[in-house]
Image (tube, rainbow, N blue to C red):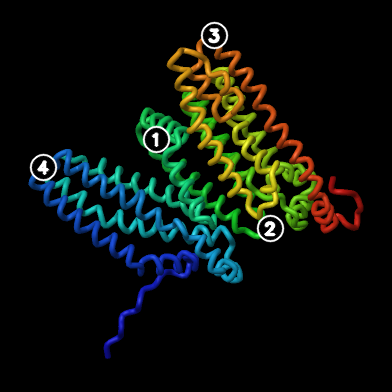
Amino acid sequence: MNVAPAIMDFPDRLSPMVVKELRQGLRTRLFGGVLLTLHIMLVLLTLMSGGAENTAAVSGWFDGIVTLVLCIIMPLRGFSAVADEIKSGTLDMLALTRLSAGRIIFGKWAAIASQSLLLMLSILPYVVARFVFGGLDLFGEIAALFYKWLAGVVIAAVIVALSTQRQFWLRTAVIFLVMTHMGTRAASSSMFTYFTKLGGPSSSLLLVGMAAWAIFFFLSLAATRIAPSASLLSVVKRSVHFVMILSLLLLGWLTGSAADIGLIAAGVLTLLMIDALTERVNEAPSVYAAFYQRGWPGRVALWLLAPGWVTGFLYSALLVALVAVFVGWTLSVEEAKLVAVSAAGTWMIAALVQLFSTRKSRDLLPPFIIFWLIVNVMIAILGIPLMASLSMRSATAWFTCALPQFLSSGYKTAQAGDKAALLDFGMLSSCIWPTVLLIAAVFAWRHARGARQEGWRMIHGKNGGTAD
């Protein structure tokens, strides 16, 4: 009697969300079409490599096709991953299965990462074949292939985070600007230069560590957008981000690379501020009760870790002070001032959100992005041409001190004798925005006092006393 072989399925230890998304993804025509087209082109390029002995042109085509698939086509599969669930109303049904917001988002990303990994592994035989033809470093090519996959899954996390926004045009505009933004390219360049200069296994470990943190950041940012009001996700992610900043600063101090680490920390700081300043003020009493039941340490932690942009403002101010002190101690006071001004630019966008009716939005991230787009478009259309004309005449662009996002460029092109005065004026004008945000935070904190009092009574109701 013949016994039919057992059908192998995904193990039960995998999250059901990962299994669901992975099954759906592997069955789509897009994945099959990409896989088939990729292998046809790689077969042709491998045959050409044998005849041309891996010339630069053939190698360029090979790397370009692999990069296109792993870093662009596969990550873009998450463009509407969460938006489609929101529009079709199935996100609430997923929540009824007791899947947390974090597991839902992770499942969306993990399915894309797994499919990209499958494609990467299928490319390995072609790398080995090209090595046999001669002229290639096998381990170097495999490492480059791994880094392309790693970059692709980080980009996929960014796109999944943006997919929580309903507006198609908003997601498209942000992706376009993020890819072309000068500040992002400068930060990425300094990071790449630092890791290249470091060299050896340490650089690989640090690069993988930074990628892992970036994935965590964007996935937690997305989970916050769909999490219920009683969620305490902010405690976990802000704690991880704080440890990340401390680790970067400690690394810069131990390795003597304060200049490179300072630039990297400033870029990371901007991302953390955006996340913290776009959380709605939480009015669920159970959230505050979770802090009050831990005594005075919990009450102290509440001011920095409780969900909401009010505590996010205090949290961001702490991180800005930490990074600015490090930069001022290891580099110069001028660089520390530039870090503070850069932070003021992010506080400015958050203050604009609170000054208009957008503060009542269900999610503060879309209005934050819209104001950020408006400011960047104004700078590109009006500010950059005017600054370029002044620079050609060897004149200082004094108008840049009025806008925190523009002061750094104006400081670099200013005349040597005007740099100190320009930076001081810029610091003075930049202080307006955190002040405005602080005033708005006081009113918002007072508005949520009832929820905090109720949370206090849930824990200490029999003993009396008040939360504030």
Secondary structure under tag 2 reads: loop
Give whichever of discs 1 and 3 has the lower sequence position. 1
The one of 88 and 188 positioned closer to us in this rendering: 88
Q: Are marks 3 and 4 in contact (CB under 8 Å)?
A: no
Q: Quadrant of the C terminus?
A: top right
The residue shown at (49%, 55%) is: 168
Q: Of the residues shown, which amino acid type is indicated by label 3?
A: Gly
Q: Which residue is mark 2?
A: 229
Which of disc 4 and disc 1 is earlier in sequence? 4
In the rendered structure, the answer to whether residue 213 lies left or right of residue 59 reads right
Circles 2 and 4: CB atoms closer than 8 Å: no
Q: Residue furthest bottom?
A: 1
- Residue 197 picture location, percent across and down: 37, 28
Query: Distance of mark 3 from mark 4, alpha carbons?
Result: 58 Å
Foreground tag (2 vs 4): 2
Q: Residue, x 75% and y 57% (percent of image)?
A: 284
CA gap, disc 1 and disc 3: 40 Å
Secondary structure under tag 1 reads helix
The residue identified by callout 4 is: 53
The residue beneath circle 3 is 417
Secondary element type, mark 4? loop
**Label whose residue precedes the other's in the sequence (1 or 2):** 1
Q: Residue at x 49, y 22 (%)?
A: 387
Q: Amino acid at mark 4?
A: Glu
Label 1 vs label 3, nearer the camera = 3
Which badge, 2 or 4, is on the more N-terminal residue? 4
Pointer 1 residue: 203
